[in-house]
Image: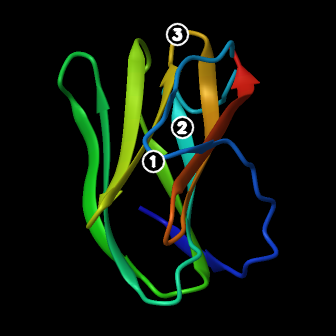
Amino acid sequence: MNRRQFGMNRRHFVAVATMASLAGCTGSFDGGGNSRLALTVQNERADPVTVRIEVVDTEGTTYEDESDRIDGGVARSYEVTGGTAGRHEVTVAGEGFRGQLAWNADTCSRFDGTVSVTDESVSVAGECVDQR
């Protein structure tokens, strides 16, 4: 998985929910038919957080399962290659929080998602940026 660290001026999507799930997208990607996830996790807390990032499909295939520590005030991006078909879900969880996003690889070849963690809430947002 490739990582690149961003400052807090990165484009920020807002869809606030304590625990939320966004599903689906209508969405060609020149990646052998695989779907791709571009995920940004923003830690808007003062203290570091340890997050677990898991990407799975409905057939039970795991495409990513990793833990990472993100310092306070830092956003980190992740790229994950998923399958060619069906619903895919990404879960970002840590102590006391959880955010989820989902997309359909049948119609969406590239999905961008953002999970932002504050002391009070978790915000999630996503969009299909490359439709099939």
Lower position in the chain sequence, tag 2 or tag 3: 2
Residue 83 visible (yes or no)? no
Q: Secondary structure at mark 1?
A: strand
Is residue 72 rendered to the left or right of residue 6? left
In the displayed structure, 70 sits above or below 110; it is below
The percent coordinates of residue 90 (x first, y second) are: 40, 40
Which residue is under mark 1?
A: 80
Frontmost residue, 109 versus 52: 52
x 52%, y 87%: residue: 72
In the displayed structure, 61 sits above or below 91; it is above
x 51%, y 16%: residue: 104
The quarter of the picture where the C terminus appears is top right
Frontmost residue, 48 versus 4: 48
Q: Secondary structure at mark 3?
A: loop
In the displayed structure, 62 sits above or below 120; it is above
Which residue is under mark 3?
A: 106
Lower position in the chain sequence, tag 3 or tag 1: 1
Amino acid type assigned to the residue bearing label 3 in the image: Asp
Lower position in the chain sequence, tag 2 or tag 1: 2
Amino acid type assigned to the residue bearing label 1 in the image: Val
How far apart are labels 2 and 3 at the CA level? Answer: 12 Å
- Checking the image for residue 36, the label placed there is 2
